[in-house]
Image (cartoon, helix red, strand yellow):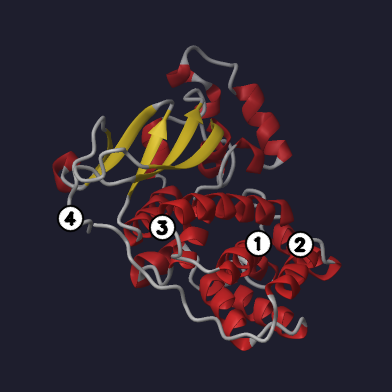
Amino acid sequence: MVFVSKPREIMTTMTIQELIKIRDAMYRDPELLAVYEKGDKNSKGQTRHDYVHGDEVRDLALNLTAQLDRAFPGMMDEVTKEFVIPVAAWLHDIGRSIDLDRHDVEGAILAKGYLDRKGVPNDLRARVCEIIGLHRAGKVIKRGIQSPEHAIVVIADKCIGDEGRVRPDKAFALRVARFFGWGSKWSLARYNWWGNAAHDRVNFSIKSANLVLDLPDDTTSRTGDIVLKLEVDERIANIEEIVTLDWFADSFFACGKGARFFGYYFRLEFNSVRHKWDKNAKNGKGAWVPTDTIVVNRNLD
C-alpha cells in the first residue's frame, strides 16, 4: 500500500525566505543555547541532551525528509520541509530546562513563546508545537502519528544514539572496562557499575548508526523498509540487551508506528544482520529476529 497525502494548506503571510532566516538564527540564538545548557545540566544523570543533540536530530530529520520526498514527491510542501521539520526537530528537547518528566509539554510551551516573539504565524507555531508535545515514545504508542512531519521527527529523535552521547567520565570508564575480561560475554564493561549504567552501556556499544530508506525495485511484491543500521561492540552490550532495554524498546516501537504511517516497515540492522519484529516469537511475547526477505503484509498493524 502506497502512502497518499495532500500537503497541509499553508496560511501564512511570511515568505519562505523570512522563515528560513528565523530558522537559521534560531540554531545559535544565545537565548536558546542557554535553555539547552540548562536542560543538559538537568539531564546530567542521562546521556547528552545539549544543543548538539538538537543539531543531530535536525540533521537526521532532514536526511530522512529528503529520502521520503524522493519516494513521495509532493507529499510535503516547502514550508514543511524547510521550516516545520527542522525547527521542531531542533527544539524538541528544550523543555528539559523546566521539567524532565514533562519536557514534551514544557518544550511546546517554550517553543510557542519563542516563535511568537519572532513573529511566526499561528498555524506554523501550532504545527511545530504539536510535534514537540507529541514526540515522546509513550505518546506515539498511545496516540499514534499525526502527520508526515511528526513521523519524521519521531523517527529521527529515536534513532539518535551512539557512543558520542555518553558523558565523558562514563565513556572513559567503559572504554577501560571493555579491555578487562575474556571475550565479549565476560568483559567488565557488561556490568552495571553505576545508576543508569545499562543506558550508558547500550549507547556506548553503538559505534555508528545510519538511517536509510530501503526501497526494492519490485514494489509490487515487497514494501519498503526504514532501516536503522547499527555497528555494535558486543563486549559492552549484546543485541538482546539493546532491543529489550525499556527505553530503547519503546523508541523502536514508536519508530515502527512512524514507518507504518508511510506504508513501510521499520527494521533494525546489527552488524549487517537485518532484524524484524516478530510478535509471535518467544511464545507470543514478541522479539526482534533476523530476516533476509520482506513479504508484504497489507495489515501493517
State the residue position of label 2. 27
Residue 46 seen from this side: no
The x, y position of residue 56, in whole percent, is: 64, 50
Outermost residue to the top: 182
Q: How crowded is mark 3: few (under 14 residues within 10 Å), some or many (20 or more)?
A: some
Say which element carries label 4: loop
- Front-lying residue, 24 or 256: 24
How far apart are the alpha carbons under marks 3 and 4? 19 Å
Q: Quadrant of residue 256?
A: bottom left
Q: Nearer the viewer, mark 3 or mark 4?
A: 3
Q: Where is residue 156 in the image (x, y as percent from the top left)?
A: 52, 53
How far apart are the two marked residues, 1 and 3, measured between alpha carbons? Answer: 24 Å
Amino acid found under the numbered disc labelled 2: Tyr
**Residue 62 can be seen, yes or no:** yes
Q: Of the residues tagged 3 and 2, which is closer to the observer?
A: 3
Q: Is mark 2 on a helix, strand or loop?
A: loop
Element marked by disc 1: helix
**Residue at x 63%, y 68% (from the top left corner):** 83
Residue at (81, 61) in percent of width and height: 28
Which one is earlier in the sequence, the residue at label 1 or at label 3? 3
Where is residue 229? Give x, y as percent.
Answer: 46, 35
Give me the residue at 62% from left, 29% from top: 174
